[in-house]
Amino acid sequence: MDTAYVIDTLFTLFSITLIILMVPGFAMLEAGLVRTKNVSSVLTVNVMIYAVASLAFILVGYALAFGELQSATMSKWAFFMFQMAFVGKAINIMSGGVGERAKLFPLTIFTVIMGGFIYPVVVNVSWGMDWLKETIFDLNMVDLAGSTVIHSTGGWALLAAILVIGSRKGRYVGNQMRVIPASNIPLVVLGAMLLWIGWFGFNGGSVGGISTKALADSVALTIFNTNVAGLSGAISAGILIYVRYKLFDITMILNGALGGLVAVTAGAHLFTMYDALAIGFIGGILVVVAIPLFDKVRIDDPVGALSVHLVNGIWGTLAVGIFASDAANSITFMNQAKGVAEIAVFAFSISYMVIYFINKVSPFRATDEEQQQGLDVSECGLEAYPEFKRAI
């Protein structure tokens, strides 16, 4: 008994390390996709999200999601840390999408509310003690590591934020969309690959242990399917981009990989290799199709987070009901769809109201002059590349 306890604790601690490795992953990805004049701001936001969201979850959010701190199969502190490692990811999804125009202070206030209340409520009705089930929610959704619980929740919060804050200065002029290129492609590649590696702990660790043969096989299958979906998403995005534009856009290929990883997250422990291949392939296509669609309706998302996390979070959760349906275990398309819809209504409506209120007190959006100068100067007083000529 003690041996299994120690093994599962060690496995969880290792998974935590991989998940926290996603913090620099998000930071590097976002820093590479924004202009040089906003890099310090983006990096500061990512560090503050990790610190503030984690502390809000430690002090308030965990109790709301899970109740008492306890675990029978591993150290309660390992389980606690594992759940804490997840919370910042939902807000990291939001931070990149409002990059280059969102101020740090109001975003930090929202991070406290997200980490202490919004995300824990979603966890409560899906993975946690479920005290809301009899009053508001009644979910039978399968979502292993958070295609909906984390990725879609963060995506809905991002959509709410963009609708309140608006687009970057100069992004849309008349009927034209101005292309704003990424500032550092090597950082984009580094960030995306760190996220990919971190996903093995994200999904594999969500199995809950590795101390028996059955658990070890489940962890290995989960990580294998996770990787397959990422590979498939990268390839499908690359193919579609080339067919449409006769170019290989590495940023779109990497977003396709991330889309595949998001999509497989809900049921990686249930899928066959061919299921994961198909789910990731469709995920990559969805990213390529969704990014220009959001731009057509003037939803300005500098990093493609809505397409990667919201669209594929929805797709991945529904895919469980398509590829792994099992009526005996209540895994049906309708149960999956119901979970997606209920969490969508809650996450979007509450996020919109909170962001709208915060924005009235402390405006989220930097002024046109601050955006022109770059948020590195106005928000941080520290430029990432002071010797470079900054792009307007």
Image (tube, helix red, strand yellow):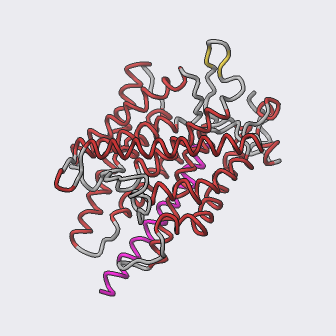
The quarter of the rendered structure image containing the N terminus is: bottom left
**Image quarter for residue 198?**
bottom left
Residue 187 shows in this picture: no
Q: Nearer the viewer, residue 303 or 77?
A: 77
**Image quarter for residue 35?**
top right
Determine the residue located farthest toward the front in the rendered image. 135
- State which region is magenta: 1-30
The quarter of the rendered structure image containing the C terminus is: top right
Count all numbered tags in the image, as a single digit: 0
Q: Is residue 250 magenta?
A: no
Residue at image position (61%, 32%) is 163
- Residue 140 placement (x, y as % from top left): 31, 53
Predominant SS along the magenta part: helix
- Residue 203 placement (x, y as % from top left): 37, 57
Q: Is residue 182 above or below residue 276?
A: above
Residue at image position (65%, 43%) is 355
Q: Nearer the viewer, residue 210 or 36?
A: 210
- Residue 325 placement (x, y as % from top left): 20, 47
Q: Is residue 117 above or below residue 249?
A: below
Q: Is residue 30 above or below residue 212?
A: above
Residue 202 shows in this picture: yes
Q: Is residue 3 magenta?
A: yes
Residue at image position (62%, 38%) is 161
Residue 176 vs residue 206: left or right?
right
- Residue 226 placement (x, y as % from top left): 33, 51
